[in-house]
Amino acid sequence: MCGIVGYIGNREAQGILIGGLKRLEYRGYDSAGVATLNSTGELTNIRAQGKVAQLAELQVKNRKTDSIGIGHTRWATHGAPSVKNAHPHTVGRITLVHNGIIENYQDLKHILVDKGYEFQSDTDTEVLAGLIDSLYSDDTNLLDAVLGALRLVVGAYGLAVIAHDTPDQIIVARSGSPLIIGLDDEETFIASDASALIGHTDQVLYLKEGEVAVCKAGDVQLYDIKANPLSAAVETLEADMQAIQKEGYEHFLLKEIHEQPDTLRATLAGRLHLDTMTASLGGINMTAEELRAVKNIVIVGCGTANYAGQLASYFIEQFTDDISVRVEIASELRYRSFHVADNTVALIVSQSGETADTLACLGELKRRGVRCLGIVNAVGSSIAREVDGGVYVHVGPEISVASSKAFTSQVAAMVLFGLVVAQAKGIGAKELAEYVQELDRLPFEIEKVINTVEDSVAHLAKEYASYEHALYMGRDTLYPVALEGALKLKEISYIQAEGHAAGELKHGPIALVDDSFFEVALIADNWLYEKSLSNLIEVNARGGHVIAITNSQKPIEAEAVVQLNTDLTVFVPLLFNVVLQLFAYYVSLERGNDVDQPRNLAKSVTVE
Ligand code: F6R
């Protein structure tokens, strides 16, 4: 979703800002812009609809040596993607970029129009610029004007503001949308996402909710909304360039799919103990007694994170006999009247740690006194900071908009939590050892699957890439995998894909089977094999074009079959999921789509 960058120092700002915006491209956007000021306060604002590359072309014609500026990638909310709606927006002496939504912008706009302000765009952001300008008089400084405006707005923002008559400072503010400030000797960098800072500095300050900062070259001063000075805690950013490069892969998604054996190992490292056949989690901050008392788990997330929760719920209920797990879509839960039973722990699942709906549920659950644990990837993100404890999944930056390695590790992290609870509740040593051993072998098995099926899956993808509809079906633990597989396909191939519980097909969806559809049947070699096979046969009988994916070695009649060779029994759904990730990738490739930045999607959904 929208991205912010800013720079103030002694070098040319334009190039640094555009470089930063390129790093934020993965978040998804539809227009981009950068504005810089020279030492006399003259503004250069260049904006382009489309990609940052188009902005870079404009910059060549409008090159400036200015050493202060702000930049933005916009994901349209108020007003269509266009140059006039692209940020930065200028009103009077104020130029700003903004992530989030100002909910009362219509009311504010009416007040400002009555005062004589005119607006060029359809955005809420331009109104905010007008509001700050209206409060920025000769006897008010920029900080006071920004604070005054922020006290009047309702909504969410991450903000970077410059004023034409003070070309030595950038004011940034955060409420509901993340911002990070990077500091070097004589330079200060601003970004909504740490990936834009990597390679510039590793000394960073995460702005907290409600904080405002005055950034000067190599210096920052923090304030609260009432203008009280705050102390700043600078941290060392732990990420490197290697992690955000493609390393020879054609796309980040393919790289991230291939990384899964290693990223999963990173999730399990230090938490799975083969010597004692146990699991442990350092960051959950719960005693054995507290773990024993857990009776209910509510898992909250959106999209892939929600499906990871659904899959994990099957496992956790299998490990214990007195825990019930419910999985909630964050955007639904936040507005519903819901009840939380006693002895509930909430798992808040988010790769980015910034998803607005998930964050709102965290707030609501905490307000009700529920212990909330994060299953988060982005270190230092909003969710990671606000939970009572949690498990970092440690998969490194996930750049492709479509999530892959995060899913696998989110499931693994929740499985670890389930095992830790089960241990506290006295799970038998033999049963526990089986789970621990399987989990330990999972990275190797994923590696094996990728090595053995990738070519044939790529070939299959070519054959099915021209369909416009797909049905995915699976039973038990393969049902959430069907949902996730269908999501992956629709996101990056734009094929309409639906996931179903295979047993539900005859209750409706089977009516869809015709020549314009293909079906993906996930068939596990377990006690449900015959039932899953019957569902496949029912589709075959109606002329379906079925791709069967199975870990059974028995022959299956289908238009195409992908066979997995593994002796895993419990965590085998994660292998099926890797096949579906590869399939979606190669279908998207075949259709010539923008694999890593699919249309209309954003990586980090920081607005609801
Ligand atoms: C799908 C995908 C999204 C995210 C969802 C939640 O490939 O990436 O469905 O899973 O937007 O994002 P996080 O995990 O960052 O909260």
Image (cartoon, grey):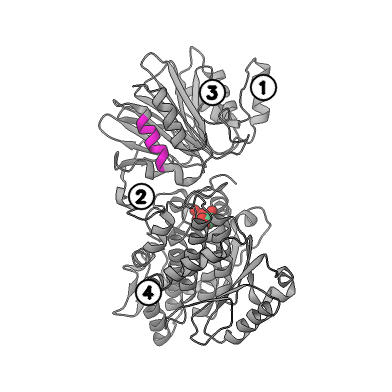
Label 4: which residue? 448
- Label drawn at residue 5: none
Q: CA distance from mark 3 to mark 4?
A: 58 Å
Let me know if residue 266 is in the magenta part: no
Amino acid residing under circle 1: Ile
Q: Which one is nearer the viewer's eye here, 65 or 133? A: 65
Q: Residue at x 35, y 28 (%)?
A: 13
Q: CA distance from mark 1 to mark 3?
A: 13 Å
Is the CB atom of the residue marked by disc 1 within 8 angstroms of ligand 1's nearest atom? no
Instruction: Please state the horizontal and vertical placement of residue 262, each as a whole percent of the image.
Output: 34, 65
Whether pointer 4 and pointer 2 mark residues with C-beta atoms closer than 8 Å, the reply is no
Q: Which one is nearer the viewer's eye here, 460 or 210? A: 460
Whether pointer 2 and pointer 1 mark residues with C-beta atoms closer than 8 Å, the reply is no
Q: Which one is nearer the viewer's eye here, 200 or 472? A: 472
Label 2: which residue? 244
Label 1: which residue? 111
Q: Residue at x 42, y 38 (%)?
A: 21
Q: Earlier in the sequence, mark 3 or mark 4?
A: 3
Q: Earlier in the sequence, mark 2 or mark 1?
A: 1
Crowd class of label 1 (few under 14; some 14 to 19; many from 20; radius 10 Å): few
Report the side of 481 relative to 375 (left or right): right
Q: Residue at x 39, y 64 (%)?
A: 260
In this rendering, the label closer to the viewer, 3 or 4: 4
